[in-house]
Amino acid sequence: MSELTGLFVVKPESVTATKGKDITFVAKVDSSNLLRKPAMKWLKGKWLDLGSKAGKHLQFKETYDRNTKVYMFILGVYLIRCVPSISSLLSLCQIYTYEMSIIKVVDGDAGGYRCEVTSKDKCDSCTFEVTVQDNSPKYIFCFNCSGDAGEDAGDLDFSALEKKQQVVQEEVDVWEILKAAKPCDYEKIAFEYGITDLRGMLKRLKKMKKVEPKKSDAFLRKLDSAYSVDKGKRIQLSVEVADPNAQVKWLKNGQEIKPSAKYVFESVGNKRTLTINKCNLSDDAAYECVVGEEKSFTEVFVKEPPVTITKLLDDVHTVVGEKVEFEVEVSEEGASVRWMKDGVELNRETAGSKYRFKKDGKRHILIINEATKEDIGMYYAFTNGGESKAELEVEDKELEVLQSIADLTVKSAEQAVFKCEVSDEKVTGKWFKDGVEVQPSDRIKMTHIGRIHKLTIDDVKASDAGDYTFVPDGYALSLSAKLNFLEIKIDYVPRQDPPKIHLDTSGTGNKNTITVVAGNKLRLDVEITGEPAPTVCWMKGDQVVAEAEGRVRVETRKTLSSFVIEGAEKPDEGHYSITVTNPAGEDKAELFIKIVDVPNPPENVKCTSVGEDSAMITWDPPAFDGGVPVKGYLMERKKVGSSRWTKLNFDVYESTTYEAKKMIEGVLYEMRVFAVNGIGISQPSTNSKPFMPIAPTSEPTRLMVDDVTDTTCALKWRPPEKIGAGGIDGYIIEYCKEGSDNWVQANEEPVGKNQYRVKGLPVGEKMLFRVVAVNIAGRSPPATLSQAVTIREIMENPKIRLPRHLRTKLISLVGEKVNLVIPFQGKPRPVRAHSGKYTLSVQIENMSDSADIHIQVVEKPGPPIAVHVTEVWGFNAALEWKPPKDDGNCDIIGYTIEKADMKTKEWFMVYEHNRRPSCTVSDLVMGNEYSFRVFSENICGLSDEPGISKNTAIITKTGLAYKPPPFKEKDISSSPKFTAPLVDRSVVAGYATAISCAVRGHPKPKIIWMKNNMIIGEDPKYLMQNKQGVLTLNIRKPSLFDGGRYSCRAINDLGQDEVQCKLEVRGKLCVMCEQGPTSPVMVEWRDHYSARHGQQHGADQD
């Protein structure tokens, strides 16, 4: 039998059953530490539940011995032998016994079985084998049936047959033959070899088979039949294989396991190990190790550790009516805790409203709402791993006098009030005067509210004097006091007190300074004392504030003067004074009202510089900070053409310069800024001008000197390698003397070509040159010449470039002409100053001849001057200009004219080779504005720079002048008219409510609220609001007396209108019930009629 572990105290054994016979298996479970009755399952193989096969062949039984608290489940006829040492344990434990019986065993009943017991938080299982053998007789045997055979009675006796055998046979090992034979051949072999004790032979053969298990070709050592592991622990399953290089597969419930952090495979030599980390209940399964065609099986059982109590219960001593809490702490969260009182289990179904159960992590709390004497006892908390107990003691609560009644001395017609307070608000009592119980009347009232008891006597008379006593019901206690009647004659003398202003501005910061947010309402209530009642005068500077209706007004009552500003505005700021006077004197107080508001928007938001994906934004602070210092700014941006603004910061930014980042190069953006002060956020600023994040280009490349004269230097270069979305607007050329860093810009405007001649340089100086590319993003890094250039005409030695046919001897016949063309070069090259008349003379002996040669050195002309638009008509514009000052030392052969729309600023050619210094440009677009430029041209080409028109041509729209109709002011005056009426409502007393309606009319109507046709005054219970014509009357915590018919009336000079509704205030139904055989049940109710008239219909006791 397997080792006893977990819940099992007796496990079923593996047996060999005889075919056709009955067999019974017994399992016993210890339930002394279980919270509920365990459940047993009998399984065959891995998952076949035999409970569904119960019938004639399979029978199950459960029994329980009440004397020893033992349950038994029995199936079958025969019991399998159990471990004897367990019998002494059964009498001390609560044992469940389960039995499974197989009736008339057949061959199909052979195989592996498993029994599994589970409780709420525990489980255990065990396995056993059933082998079926067929013992039907195949030979005729001789039985020794003598009556004195004793223990051998019924055994087979082959002695007679042995005597007949005369042949001596060779000695053989009969056990090797039996181990290799089939069970059906055992009787034949025993008969052949003379074995008479067949039962002993079977027992010995069974032991030999157990000792020598069947050898496996693939496994040297297989898995154990079962493994057990605690939940959360690690377990290793290992086998030894015959081939060190063999590959194994691990299966769980028939599914292959993949290696992971939970399942770790190890292979060391012949050993193969599967490690399961942090086992949980899902790992309770059947596992297989597969090598080729062979398999090794096992089962893993995961056990949950018992839940222990880490913090025990504490005894509680309390008084009647108090709340009691028993708290216990367990070792695991989510564990089940069972509560019991004096052996009776407490749960949510049986506890009712008396007990409450609370779980908070590992803490479990039993709450008794109001302790009584019946709750005295011992309370237990049980888990599957421990228990704790505590005792509850409840005592009667003593009545304490918190406030006793006091002696009173009152005058005639005054009110006398005796008041006392006791510790228990449920205690009732009676009032006595001179030992006689006081009865209530119209003049005498007795009240009991909570813990306070009052006796009120109105209009006191001399007969009311005496000793008064309050006696609480059920307590040996009394409170006494005396009422003394005093009758005094007083001669009235008019009293005069000087007036006094009681002004409290302690919570407003500076003394007598009141700060109001613009748009809010200011109501300053000033208490005034003085006898007789003083007159009040409010002033702002030298102007008296009138006591009339208006936005700024004064409301005066007997001892209170209120200064009201509706919707405070900035002009309301200033010094105010209040003066009170009466015949006894005068008092005056001054105060300053400061109006604060959100600041004005920031100003002058602009972009100062841009980068590849960023821009630097600056702005000016708001002109008005709202009366409160500006804390900082919030920025937003959007793409041009989009309506979606993106916030750039959520925390207030204090500076007025901000670098906006993470923008897209080449996209136009706009920015706006909000100012923030202690009151709020300003309106947004005007949008900045659109800007585009663009990175400057890289430096120009291959900068070199093309030519040098005595005063000029010609440079040329290649465009930058990286240009970007901003393109190139042109180049700026700078120079400085060698050894100096004072760079001088050579050109005022950027040049668009990749060459430039710097003029006006000092002769003989060594100069450095650099070129910078310019676009909307700014200047690129400069491209600088590596060496200084000396400003001096480069002289080239004369050089004759002799043609190839002249490099040999030239042979010519006598009388032939000889014409030689010989090219040569040298410097200086011709300039315009070299133009003129040259004479060539040829002399032979005393004869000569000469010829004049005229040489003209020319270059490109300058730009035309004084280009301007002389006239615009229809879709045409007339241009005129003057010839350039520098014609390039040759005649001007024409002009090229271009136009550009001021919106796009793209240039288009209009005329070329125009010979006259004027032209007319046609086909212009109506509504557009045009600019023009003119290039001069000679035989060298167009001028490098154009002449640009000083004025523009605007093509106006003709014949489409809009003549708006004359404006006629509309009379919008109207009498008041309610657009949304009041609606009847039903509300619960004690909960704030509101009724609303909407009205329109011009001039703005005056609003009057009424209840039951009575005007509602300045009652603080009512709050009246008017927002854009929406009228609301808020009622704070209405009582039953606030029900009735409410109406709203709107009045102006043109008429009036009125709406009304009914407001019903429902009272609360109060039901007080107390469970118990002797406790009364009191029900108190009020209907709407009785609530309004202060009458209580009844209070019944059952």
Image: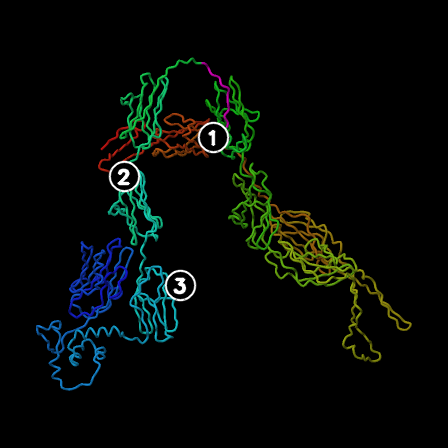
Q: Is residue 985 left or right of residue 65?
A: right
Where's residue 970, x and y in %?
Answer: 50, 33
Q: Is residue 500 magenta?
A: yes
Q: Which numbered mark, 2 or 3, is in the foreground of this view?
A: 2
Where's residue 745, x and y in %?
Answer: 71, 54
Residues under labels 1 and 3: Cα distance?
A: 79 Å
Q: Quadrant of the N terminus?
A: bottom left
Residue topped by disc 2: 372
Which amino acid, by three-letter code, is at mark 3?
Ala
Which amino acid, by three-letter code, is at mark 1?
Lys
Nearest the eye: 38 or 459: 38
Considering only order in the chain, which callout, 3 or 1, is on the residue closer to the N terminus?
3
Residue topped by disc 3: 261
Q: Residue 1004's mark?
A: 1
- Most distant residue in the left direction: 147
- Most distant residue in the right direction: 846
Q: Is residue 1015 visible?
A: yes
